[in-house]
Amino acid sequence: MSDEGGAGEPLNVRALLGDDAVYEAAAAEAFPEYNKARLVSLELPDRSGDIIISTYGEIDKNNYLDPRTAQVATIDHMKQTCTKLRPAEDEELPSAYIEEFRCALDVELSKYVVEAYPKGACAVYCTSGKDIEGPGADFSFTAVISAAKRSPQNFCNGSWRSIWTMDFNYELQFVDIKGKIQVDAHYFEEGNVQLDTNIDRKDSTMMQSPDDCAVSITNIIRHHESEYLSSLEESYLNLSDATFKDLRRKLPVTRTLFPWHNTLAFSLTRDLAKELALGK
């Protein structure tokens, strides 16, 4: 697999293997895993939006639910394209009660993603309790955010991926929120520098109406992601003044250049003899 530039083949792996059957079998396993791990987003065939390839919307290896449009997309993982759509079946969708909470969060989260991430995409999935018909039981959502910048002509690629889980506890009227943010960047102009970092976050809020819950949860996500982005930017500002300097070999105490034209001036034997007063 290649880096964040995509799942294309950096080498002609098929030719290297010399066995089409082995290649097809390996690719059928590897490409879906890559696309799900990278939260790859693809345009839907009807141009109604983008779908994120994730385990949370996976119906089977090649079919994925888009909760926003209530459609199931068939994916060609190797070509990273949607080949067809069908309406989701009732059992693949949450109840009207759960959908009210999910849809409200999806609307607020989409506003934030448009504001924060150029060409970013997001989705909100019900991961448990989707058949609950009314108040009185617990349920859970997972929200995913995916944004990628691919600019090989400028020798750089990068991505931002975050996954937020929300557990709604009806008895306590409480929403427990956990997040994982992953950032990758690759610069390869006259060198090869990569960043691969992640961080976990925890928070909570009170369970309220669907709209109020959506606003509160989105504000929490915005706060943590903005805070983490600021910390990364601050680290980059300190790279030249601190980190890179620490990586470099320090100058000699004499702060003089090494005399390559006369290396005998630094004869180890002579210096040791002088220190130990040998030969006297």
Image (spheres, rainbow, N blue to C red):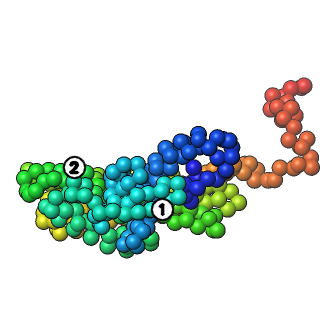
| Amino acid type of the residue tagged 1 in the rendering | Thr
The residue wearing badge 2 is 128
Callout 2 environment at 10 Å: few (<14), some (14 to 19), or many (20+)?
A: some
Residue at coordinates 52% horizontally, 66% vertically from top-left? 149
Is residue 185 placed above or below 46 in the rendered structure?
above
**Amino acid type, label 2:** Ser
Res 206 → quadrant:
bottom left
Q: Splitting the image into 4 quarters, where does residue 123 fall?
A: bottom left
Look at 57% across and 49% down and name the residue there.
1
x, y (%) of residue 176? 21, 52
Q: Is residue 231 visible?
A: no
Mark 1 residue crowding within 10 angstroms, few (<14) / some (14–19) / many (20+): some
Left or right of residue 135: residue 164:
right
Give the percent coordinates (x, y) of residue 44.
Answer: 41, 67
Residue 88 percent across, percent down from the top left = 28, 60
Of marks 2 and 1, the one in the foreground: 1
Query: How many numbered callouts?
Result: 2
Choose between 202 and 59: the one closer to the eye.
Answer: 59
**Vertical placement of residue 276 versus 196, above or below:** above
Q: Work out whether residue 260 or residue 147 is closer to the camera in this orientation and state it.
A: 147
- Distance from Cα at disc 2 to Cα at disc 1: 29 Å
Q: Quadrant of residue 98?
A: bottom left
Question: Going 7% across and 53% down the picture, which residue do you hit?
Answer: 136
In the image, taking residue 78 as reference, residue 134 lies left or right, namely: left
Residue 81 circle label: 1
Question: 9 or 2: nearer the eye?
Answer: 9
